Amino acid sequence: MRVATWNVNSIRARLPRLLAWLEERQPDVVCLQETKVVDQEFPFAEVEGLGYQVASFGQKTYNGVAILSRLPMERVERGLPGDRSGEARLVTAQVAGVTVACLYVPNGQEVGTEKYAFKLQWMAHLRAFLAQRFTPQDLLILCGDFNVAPEDRDVWDPELWRGKILFSEPEKQAFFDLLQWGLVDCLRLHHPEAGLYTWWDYRQGAFHRGWGMRLDHILATPPMARRCSEVTIDRNARKGDKPSDHAPVLARFD
């Protein structure tokens, strides 16, 4: 099973690119973030025309997540228990006996703000949700834009970013709390090197300068991590006309 995650930064703006990418790469399961449309306006016909079922959890203008699957989906659930914000940030489904969770963690805006506190609270709720609903021995994959670069090797200039949003210590600790519960960072199973990024700001030519961060992750419980044979970042999807500011991450589970 080939599983991908991609923050498309508006499925309306990125639909032609998404459809072309799905035809080229043909992943079995795709987790999308920042779809930015209500469910009634999701492009179901176009995506289903490529052989994918869709489980969408959207909202107008902001946020929005969706799971696309070429395999049957069961037990679709929308929303994070305990999150009363009304924001569309989590959808889960069972695919071929594996629970796939697609999530979009709040950005946090700036350290010390109310939005930053909400981000940390949301991540704590996610951690509690995992503990209540699953065990580390379950077949579980978490995919999405976590809006956290966990380590120095995940940031183009760690000293510049240290203590700032996306790279502050409380955010990183919240991410590691997920790992400590019983999740494995699948990319790091295969690629220990620095310089592997999934997000580049649109400004200042960041992509071409290599000014990136690794914010998008595929995490899995140990039974699934043992089946993970490959993880890649598709940098080519960040190139060209009107790209998302994120690149897709793809993992293969044998």
Image (cartoon, rainbow, N blue to C red):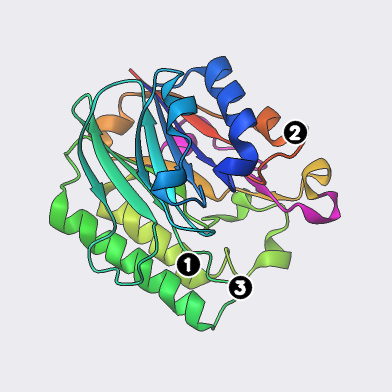
| Secondary element at image label 2 | loop
Structural distance between the alpha carbons of marks 3 and 2: 30 Å
Q: Which residues are magenta?
A: 184-205
Instruction: Give the side of residue 148 with respect to residue 29, left or right.
Output: right
The residue singled out by tag 1 in the image is: 171
The residue singled out by tag 3 in the image is: 163
The residue singled out by tag 2 in the image is: 239
Residue 126 at x, y = what percent?
30, 60
Structural distance between the alpha carbons of marks 1 and 3: 10 Å
Residue 217 at x, y = what percent?
47, 44
Residue 230 lies, with reference to residue 133, above or below; the image says above
Whichever of labels 1 and 3 marks the residue nearer the N terminus, that label is 3
The residue located at (69%, 36%) in the rendering is: 238
What amino acid type is highlighted by mark number 3? Answer: Gly
Structural distance between the alpha carbons of marks 1 and 2: 29 Å
Report whether residue 70 is seen: yes
Whichever of labels 3 and 2 marks the residue nearer the N terminus, that label is 3
Instruction: Give the side of residue 30 with respect to residue 132, left or right.
Output: right
Residue 185 among those drawn in magenta: yes
Instruction: Give the side of residue 213 with respect to residue 35, left or right.
Output: right
Which quadrant holds residue 11? Answer: top right
Whichever of labels 1 and 2 marks the residue nearer the N terminus, that label is 1
Residue 122 lies, with reference to residue 19, above or below; the image says below
What amino acid type is highlighted by mark number 2? Answer: Lys
Residue 174 among those drawn in magenta: no
